[in-house]
Image (cartoon, grey):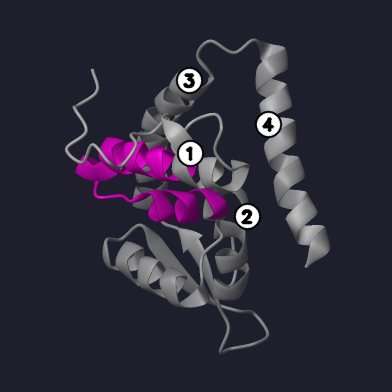
């Protein structure tokens, strides 16, 4: 059930330019914001934010990354990532290891408790992803995924 709009002059999501007639870029941003809010609510009692979840996920998939590489993969600025890594390290979810050759470079890996935390987070995120795809056929889901990847890779090629 949707709450009544407290500001009637501002359209609710799905109405006016916030609806199907809106700019695709705005609609993507609106959807991303709604998704992040769902993620933060689902992971909040675990003490994990959506950017922290992405950081943990990328470290699990690509262990031993440097801060710079991890920031690129997690779509975060190096400054934001540094704060996230420091908080996750303080919580015991990450460990830093010196690079074998370059002593000043630190590799970041998940700790055992970080892997346990990520498993708990994944269960909740999978439920959210199931909600996102509810009502879509397998072919429709593949088309949406293909389109989103196409949007991302086109932007990468252009830069």
Task: Quadrant for residue 137, please give it.
Answer: top right
Residue 110, relative to residue 35: is it above or below? below
**Mark 4 or mark 3, which has the lower sequence index?**
3
Q: Residues within 10 Å of mark 2 (few under 14, many from 20)?
A: some
Which is closer to the viewer, label 4 or label 3?
Answer: 4
Locate residue 4: give its quadrant: top left
Alpha-carbon span between mark 1 and mark 2? 39 Å
Q: CA distance from mark 4 to mark 3?
A: 14 Å
First in sequence: mark 4 vs mark 1: 1
Pointer 2 residue: 62
Q: Which residue is mark 4?
A: 145
In the displayed structure, 76 sits above or below 29; it is below
Q: CA distance from mark 4 to mark 1?
A: 24 Å
- Lower position in the chain sequence, tag 3 or tag 2: 2
- For label 2, the SS is loop
Q: Secondary structure at mark 4?
A: helix
Q: Which residue is mark 3?
A: 130
Ranked by sequence position, the earlier of labels 3 and 1 is 1
Q: Nearer the viewer, mark 3 or mark 1?
A: 1
For image coordinates 74% across by 57% down, the residue present is 155
Q: Are marks 3 and 2 in contact (CB under 8 Å)?
A: no
Q: Position of residue 48 (x, y in %)?
A: 31, 50
- Of callouts 4 and 2, which one flags the residue occurring earlier in the amino acid sequence? 2
Q: Which residue does the numbered mark 1 point to in the structure image?
A: 17
Q: Indicate whether 83 appears above or below 63.
A: below
Q: Residue at 42% of width from left, 38% of height from top?
A: 35
């Amino acid at each position: 059930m949707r709450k009544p709009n407290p500001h009637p002059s501002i359209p609710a999501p799905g109405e006016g330019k916030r609806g199907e007639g809106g700019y695709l870029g705005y609609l993507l941003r609106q959807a991303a914001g709604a998704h992040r809010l769902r993620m933060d609510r689902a992971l909040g009692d675990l003490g994990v934010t959506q950017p922290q979840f992405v950081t943990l996920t990328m470290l699990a998939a690509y262990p031993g990354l440097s801060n710079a590489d991890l920031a690129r993969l997690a779509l975060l600025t190096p400054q934001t990532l540094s704060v996230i890594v420091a908080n996750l390290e303080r919580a015991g979810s990450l460990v830093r290891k010196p690079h074998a050759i370059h002593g000043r470079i630190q590799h970041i890996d998940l700790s055992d408790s970080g892997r346990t935390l990520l498993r708990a987070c994944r269960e909740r995120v999978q439920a959210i992803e199931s909600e996102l795809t509810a009502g879509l056929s397998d072919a429709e889901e593949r088309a949406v995924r293909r389109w989103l990847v196409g949007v991302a890779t086109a932007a990468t090629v252009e830069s």
